[in-house]
Amino acid sequence: MSGTIDIARLEAAMAQAQTVLKGALLVGSIWDQSTGLPLVGYNSNPVAAALLAQLIQMLDQHLATSGFPALDRFLFLQFQAGKAGLAVLHPHNLVQGLLIDTTKTNVGVIMSVLLPRLLKAI
């Protein structure tokens, strides 16, 4: 992608998540981090995408003012009720956010199979 966003690649990245996670993928979006607006999605939740975009921006700002290094490629959040969140920070200011049911898959699949594929997808 040079200057323009290749929507087909974004859709392929979302399809990759669906294929690996099967029924464990609850929600997925890829959005422009600067606007928080979703570009592609699966059971997409635009409010959640905008909120996560804001959270990533705030976290980056707080890390910088605290003298910590900036975020690199991903965030993994373990939630209550058997849910996990994965945010992959792609090039071109794109973020892929996923809400995953960890009762239907495990963290090993997420981190060892899914994440490496998504890091190469865009």
Image (cartoon, rainbow, N blue to C red):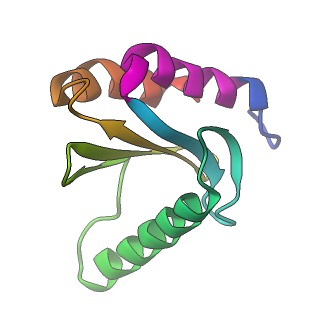
Q: Where is residue 55 in the image (x, y as percent from the top left)?
A: 43, 71
Residue plotted at (27% across, 28% down): 110
| View extreme (right): residue | 4
Q: Where is residue 94 in the image (x, y as percent from the top left)?
A: 60, 48
Q: Would you identify the image quadrant in which residue 84 lies?
A: top left
Looking at the picture, does residue 102 appear above or below residue 36?
above
Camera sees residue 88: yes
Camera sees residue 91: no
Q: How many marks?
A: 0
**Is most of the magenta stretch helix, strand or loop?**
helix
Looking at the picture, does residue 69 appear above or below residue 122?
below
Residue plotted at (36% across, 51% down): 72
Q: Where is residue 5 in the image (x, y as percent from the top left)?
A: 77, 39
Q: Where is residue 85 in the image (x, y as percent from the top left)?
A: 34, 47
Does the magenta-highlighted stretch encompass residue 22? yes
Does the magenta-highlighted stretch encompass residue 89? no
Q: Identify the image quadrant of the C terminus.
A: top right
Left/right placement of residue 53 relative to residue 55 reads: right
- Taking depth in this image into account, of 93 and 115 the one nearest to the observer is 115
Residue plotted at (57% across, 20% down): 15
Task: Read off the magenta span.
Answer: 9-24
- Taking depth in this image into account, of 63 and 107 the one nearest to the observer is 107
Left/right placement of residue 88 relative to residue 28 reads: left
Q: Identify the image quadrant of the N terminus.
A: top right
| View extreme (bottom): residue | 65
Residue plotted at (61% across, 53% down): 93
